[in-house]
Image (tube, helix red, strand yellow):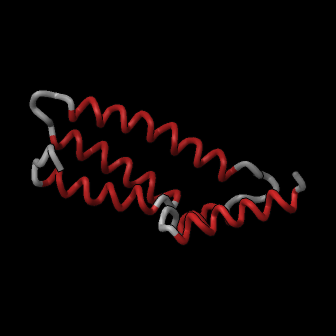
Amino acid sequence: MEVGQLQSRWFDLTSSLFHEGFLDNQFTQLQQLQDESNPGFVFEVVTLFFDDSEKLLSDLGRALDQQTVDFEKVDAHVHQLKGSSSSIGAQRVKNVCIAFRNFCDANNKEG
């Protein structure tokens, strides 16, 4: 596949993700930090986000599986996920974290 075709597909994909609310303007700002001296910057940051998120979600699952849920601990995991998702522009993840934290405040395990 030609570079032009790849660039076009990339543009279409990111446009779709913005349109569907998965990404916000923070992702655009992240892209603007990438330059010739670090052409893989966005890839590296997003990869770190996914790696960290996998660990956070695992920790979150373990915390919720406890007989007695420590909602402060759960909230701390969700707060960290909210912050990292916000920093890369993962809008939907951030919004779900906000709702999740409300359930933590209410000590609502089912929520």
- Which residue is painted at 64% across and 45% down in the image? 44
Q: Is residue 79 above or below residue 32?
A: above
Rendered image quadrant of residue 13: bottom right
Rendered image quadrant of residue 102: bottom left
Return the residue nearer the eye: 2 or 90: 2
Q: Where is residue 35 in the image (x, y as percent from the top left)?
A: 77, 59
Q: Is residue 65 above or below residue 25?
A: above
Q: Where is residue 85 in the image (x, y as percent from the top left)?
A: 45, 54
**In the displayed image of the protein, which residue is found farthest to the right?**
2
Q: Position of residue 59 (x, y in %)?
A: 32, 32
Q: Is residue 17 left or right of residue 55?
A: right
Rendered image quadrant of residue 72: top left
Q: How many labels does the image show?
A: 0
Q: Position of residue 22 (x, y in %)?
A: 49, 62
- Which residue is painted at 32% across and 55% down in the image? 97
- Which residue is painted at 80% across and 57% down in the image? 6
- Which residue is painted at 51% across and 42% down in the image? 50
